[in-house]
Image (cartoon, helix red, strand yellow):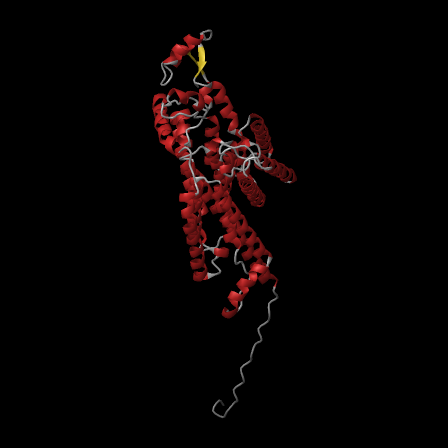
Amino acid sequence: MAASSRQDRSILWLLIIMLIFAPLFRAGNLPLPLMVLELLALSVLLLLFLRAQPLEQVKTSHLGWSAALFLLPVPGLIALPLDTLYSLPGRDFLQSVFSAVGSTDSQWRSLSLVPHNTEAALWALLPPIAVFMAVCSLPRQQVMKLVYIMLGMAVFQSVLSLMQYGGGFGGALYLPNEYGMKAAAGTYLNKDHLAGFLEMTFPVALALLAASVGHTHSLGPRGSRWRERMNFLSTLKGHQAGLYALIGLVVLLALVFTRSRAGIALAMLGLFLVMIAFSRRLGGSNVYGTYGTLFAVIMVLTAEIGLAPILDRFSEDSMEDMRWNIYASTLRGIMDNFPLGAGAGSYPEIYPHYQPASVDAFVNHAHNDYLEWLFDGGVAALLLILSGLLVFARGWLAVWRSGRWRTFRYVQVGAGIGLLLLILHSLIDFNLHKPANAIWFAFLLGLFLHENNEEQEISDKTRKRVRTRRLNTPAVPIPTVSKPRKPITMKDW
């Protein structure tokens, strides 16, 4: 048991290092930082399999899906005879290419059109898979520590990006990005990818706020309840609620200054979903009643109204004009290579073969994660996408419970909303092709699907405490009252 505890602590510290390190160097999108993340992931997986009960907390369906995801690039590395390869969809042009470059020395070639990219894609899947399985395996208390790490990273990125925006181009904190001084990008190269990370974190901060606000252990007479609820703000729980509110505000402000149209729109959607999920559950059982629900709804709607003109006037999307042309040409590539796909990681090299003249820019991603996965992975990628969405939908059935919620349940619902926002964002961008955001997405997915019996455990402890108290309470003898004796009369004789 002690050895397992030590291994859990080691896994926790490795995850902390991974989660902090991942966004710091261009979101892990450079060879050396990515290699460091892959080595850390291998260490995490090794410790997981060395445990006394490895991956016991990971459901079989989740483990199978993770294994299928990791094995997705493997068929692309299988070597086939050239005659067989030329006959496969999307590979008929290889014969003329090999003849033109004089590369006919080998009679066997990999199924992937760009084998070295496919091998790199295989290893790049290790960090998110390791994070997902580790988070599913760790105890709730340790997972909550990682949640606080996520909030800390979100605050760091938000404050840095706001200071960069204020300092402008060439400032002391300026880091070169694709948009110069016109947008806040933090340590990311692309403002939309910073927005993707922040929009995942935003609902989690609001979930913790909803879970902590208004907690009271006892309520006095009706006239004193509101006074006691207001006094809550001076307690430790009240200070925590204020801190979560401040974190949410800072993250939202940074999202606005990224000037990401999708980021601001999804933040508005996230606010609306948070209102639906938590407005009737403030403090666990809605300690503020109907008035508290109405106040929360009014606050959210006011924020939505305030963000609407910002979305129209302040945001920008430099790819808006070209995006639909990229989608159309990517679909042609998908159909040409279907059902096998071009091979994992092949998109940057193969897409120029389909790029129309109207797209006068270097395109290294499809600006739609799902289209790029279909381009690379074919029908296998399609099945993985559909099964992943099914896993996510079934996760909601397990998380959404009736009755009083505890803090971890709130965080899981917030994580589910954050996942949904990035799933939608991936329709118009390539957030999940960036290692840092893929790792944070895997963390939230592991948190969302984590086994949670917190409410049942607390209920069982309460019943056990009451039962023990009853058993330890000495029985009080009940005094017997004797009936007065009836006097004897002559009639009785």
Q: Is residue 9 visible?
A: yes
Judged left or right of residue 302, residue 217 is right
Residue 252 in picture, x, y percent from top left:
49, 46
Visible in this render: residue 451? Answer: no
Q: Quadrant of residue 238?
A: bottom right
Which quarter of the image is occupied by the N terminus?
top right
Residue at 47%, 47% (x, y): give it: 413
Q: Report x, y in % for residue 62.
A: 47, 35
Instruction: Please state the horizontal and vertical placement of residue 37, each as a whole percent of the image.
Output: 57, 30
Judge left or right: residue 18 versus residue 260.
Answer: right
Q: Residue at x 48, y 61 (%)?
A: 288
Which quarter of the figure has residue 313?
A: top left
Of residue 304 and residue 219, the one placed in the foreground of this image is: 304
Given residues 331 and 143, the one toward you in this image is 331
- Number of on-image labels: 0
Taking the spot 54% from the left edge, 48% from the top edge, the residue there is 247
Closer to the camera in the image, 182 or 119: 182
For this orientation, the residue located farthest to the bottom is 490
Q: Position of residue 90 (x, y in %)?
A: 37, 18
Q: Is residue 81 above or below residue 72?
A: above
Image vertical order of residue 88 relative to residue 367, above or below: above
Q: Is residue 188 above or below residue 152?
A: above
